[in-house]
Amino acid sequence: MSTRNFLYHTEEKHSMPKLHTPAEFSRILTAAVVNQQFCNTLLKNPSLALANGFCGEKFNLTREEKRQLLSIQASSLEEFAQQLIADKSMARVSCCAGD
């Protein structure tokens, strides 16, 4: 299986509705795990990492998801993932608080 198919099955991209989160965040973190250069770019210049994509694939993020990722300041992938999860958890709490 190629890296491209591992990260994002091309057939699914065209046939399924766009479910961004957490699938896109998972793709970004997976790319960072399997490629040190992408990981370094994500940590130092997340805007560039998102703009460049990975292995010819772009990341399909909503404006809010992109804002969330770009607001993270982390020195390691572990710290990046923790902040991403914490931010997502807080979004769920605030979203559901009015229910």
Image (cartoon, rainbow, N blue to C red):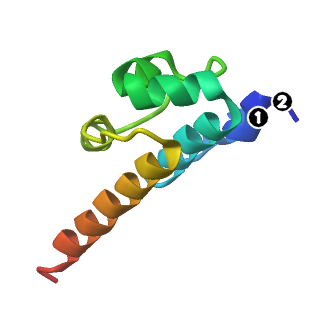
Give how far across and how far down residue 77 sits, in percent: 51, 43
**Residue beneath the point at 23% across and 74% down:** 93
**Residue beneath the point at 67% across and 29% down:** 35
Quarter the N terminus occupies = top right
Give how far across and how far down residue 80 sits, in percent: 42, 46
Q: Distance between the residues labelled 2 and 1?
A: 5 Å
- Number of the label disc, if any, that sits on residue 53: none
- Number of the label disc, if any, that sits on residue 2: 2
Q: Describe the element under mark 2 as helix, strand or loop.
A: loop
Q: How crowded is mark 1: few (under 14 residues within 10 Å), some or many (20 or more)?
A: few
**Residue beneath the point at 77% across and 30% down:** 3
- The amino acid type, in three-letter code, at marker 1 is Asn
Number of residue marks: 2
Q: Residue furthest toward the right?
A: 1
Please report contact status of discs 2 and 1: CB closer than 8 Å, yes or no.
Answer: yes
Quick check: 90 left or right of 33?
left
Q: Which of 94 and 40 is in front in this view?
A: 40
Q: Describe the element under mark 1 as helix, strand or loop.
A: helix
Q: Quadrant of residue 12?
A: top right
Give how far across and how far down residue 14 sits, in percent: 61, 35
**Residue beneath the point at 83% across and 30% down:** 2
Q: Residues within 10 Å of mark 2 (few under 14, many from 20)?
A: few
- The amino acid type, in three-letter code, at marker 2 is Ser
Residue named by callout 1: 5
